[in-house]
Amino acid sequence: MSDFSLELNEDQLQVQKWVHDFAENVIRPAAQEWDEREETPWPIIQEAAKIGLYSFDFIASCYMDPTGLTFPLISEEITWGDAGIGLAIFGSTLAVAGIYGNGTPEQVAEWVPQCFGTPDDVKLAAFAVTEPDAGSDVSSLRTRAVYDEANDTWTLDGTKTWITNGGIADLHVIVASVDPELGSRGQASFVVPAGTLGIRQGQKFSKMGIRASHTAEVILDGCRIPGRCLLGGKERLDERLSRAREGKRSSTQAAMATFEASRPLVGAQAVGIARAAYEYALDYAKERRQFGRAIIENQAIAFKLADMKMNIDAARLLVHRAAWMGANRKTFSNGEGSMSKLFAGETAVWVTEQAIQVLGGYGYVKDYPVERWHRDAKIYTIFEGTSEIQRLIISRAISGLHLR
Ligand SMILES: Cc1cc2nc3c(=O)[nH]c(=O)nc-3n(C[C@H](O)[C@H](O)[C@H](O)COP(=O)(O)OP(=O)(O)OC[C@H]3O[C@@H](n4cnc5c(N)ncnc54)[C@H](O)[C@@H]3O)c2cc1C
């Protein structure tokens, strides 16, 4: 018998079902309401915390799956329920990835649990890289971090924008420039703990989709934090900066390392939206009758559904491959992480649009969920690196050229 298998194991199937039940019974029924309210769905996050779904222990157990598949599996189920609420629940994991990717084991142990709080006192976390003039070009961050050796403190100044949970999070991970001349190699990540002065929410954005997820500016104005809040520690930063000044290669780039680790997870979320829309359209096509027969009896509709299903399965396979590679420390030599996010994001946009077409006029109104799924899907070609930037990463990987 072959060792190779695409079947999920018992543990994975069990956790997948558990999360699916929560998505079906709690998240999906609330989706329309929170989309309209455009507010953070605290009661749902609290419910997720009560059953242990929104918790440090659960996320840690997902990360421990040696196949790497558990996290993408649950991400798909959650966003199958609703992407906006899903992001409200799992937006904190961006900060977790930032701490995990750049922090020392002691910092991970101290700060990661604080990203979640407790079921009785739920907390959120945010990961802030993007700035008004530094989106795709993360090397041009203007937020500055200045060290005061006498007091062992860092002072952060600048404006972050488009930040998920920005300003409502208890804990913010901020990527800032320590030495602007070194571009992304002169950057570092900092934890700004709860209760710190000099950090506040700026404008809250009103969005096209994922409206249950809070997105806002974060203003840092003389925000002073202790030296221990520098992720990775001062010694490691100094070493890294001196290597960069000598023109030597560096193995870490604070922001890029975090994004690379989370790409298949973002792809899995996109797969969840696409699957929701496909399943809905398939059921609808079997029910809806025109010209005396179900519309699925027309090849034009049946072939559309066949293509939707095929693209979703292809996207999921790319996501699972990249997640498996990440968990097993394989080198992403062809930009496989980017491929998974790119293909899944574009598939979600395409599939949700096809679903609208299958529903006709009913797909275009808010009484049916497919128009919301289409609005939600669009963000997956924009955040965590746009489709163009993913193509750039893949092109560079396969060509070995520094394409621009
Ligand atoms: C809802 C939402 C939530 C977000 N959450 C977070 C968060 O939690 N934390 C965070 O740090 N950021 C977050 N972001 C920011 C997000 O990652 C950025 O919006 C994204 O990286 C793109 O940056 P930009 O919007 O400045 O677009 P730009 O970089 O200005 O890009 C504009 C267009 O130009 C294209 N382009 C740019 N450079 C190139 C190039 N070299 N080659 C080809 N095309 C190019 C882009 O692909 C895009 O089509 C969020 C954004 C949104 C909308």
Image: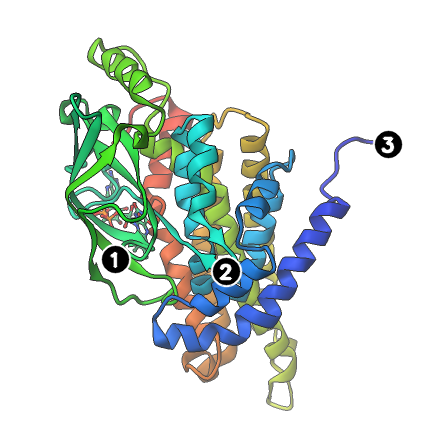
The mark total stands at 3
In the image, which is nearer the foreground, mark 3 or mark 1?
A: 1
Q: Nearer the viewer, residue 64 or 364?
A: 64
Q: Which residue is mark 2?
A: 120
- Is residue 60 visible from the viewing direction of this image? yes
Residue visible at 42% across and 50% down in the picture: 92
- Is residue 311 visible from the viewing direction of this image? no
How far across and down, in percent of the image, does residue 181 sit?
14, 23
Measure the alpha-carbon separation of dots 2 and 1: 26 Å
How far across and down, in percent of the image, does residue 164 sit?
33, 54
Number of the label disc, if any, that sits on residue 145: none
Q: Which residue is mark 3?
A: 1
| 164 with respect to 353 (left or right) | left
The amino acid at mark 3 is Met
Q: Which residue is mark 1?
A: 216
| 87 with respect to 328 (left or right) | left
| 122 with respect to 163 (left or right) | right
